[in-house]
Image (cartoon, grey):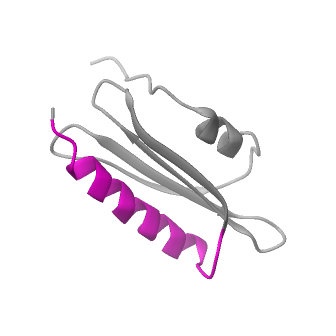
Amino acid sequence: MAPVTRRRTKAYFEWAAAHLPYSSKEETLPNGVFVEACGRQLTGGQVQLFIGIYTADGELVLEDYTENVQEMTVAEAIDWGFDRGRSVGNSQKF
């Protein structure tokens, strides 16, 4: 099976432009939707979060980039983002 090319938006490219190390969590849901949540902490303590949700064909469902997640660690932000992504992803009907 060939890898799926995901249709990325400005939100992803703003996230990726920093070229910094990050942690992530990803899953393909039973309905085929792919969910990813990525987080990182900048040297000033700022926590950034990217959430991406895509159909099995790589079409965009939702992308969101938050530059400064308030009052969460990187792990907490990733878990929160991943839960949000799963909720949105599980609501998709095909």
Residue 94 drawn at (x, y percent)? 15, 32
Q: Is residue 73 above or below residue 57?
A: below
Residue 90 drawn at (x, y percent)? 21, 51
The secondary structure that dominates the magenta segment is helix
Residue 61 drawn at (x, y percent)? 37, 38
Q: Is residue 60 above or below residue 81?
A: above
The one nearer the camera, 20 or 13, is 13
In the picture, measured across the screen, residue 91 lies left or right of residue 24, that is left
Confirm whether the magenta stretch covers residue 89: yes
In the picture, measured across the screen, residue 84 lies left or right of residue 14, that is left
- Residue 56 image-quadrant placement: top left
x 64%, y 76%: residue: 70
x 37%, y 55%: residue: 85
In the picture, measured across the screen, residue 60 lies left or right of residue 76, that is left
The magenta stretch is: 69-93
Query: Which residue is farthest top?
Result: 2
Confirm whether the magenta stretch covers residue 60: no
Q: Is residue 61 above or below residue 73?
A: above
In the picture, measured across the screen, residue 41 lies left or right of residue 44, that is left
- Residue 54 image-quadrant placement: top left
The one nearer the camera, 9 or 2, is 9
x 59%, y 71%: residue: 74
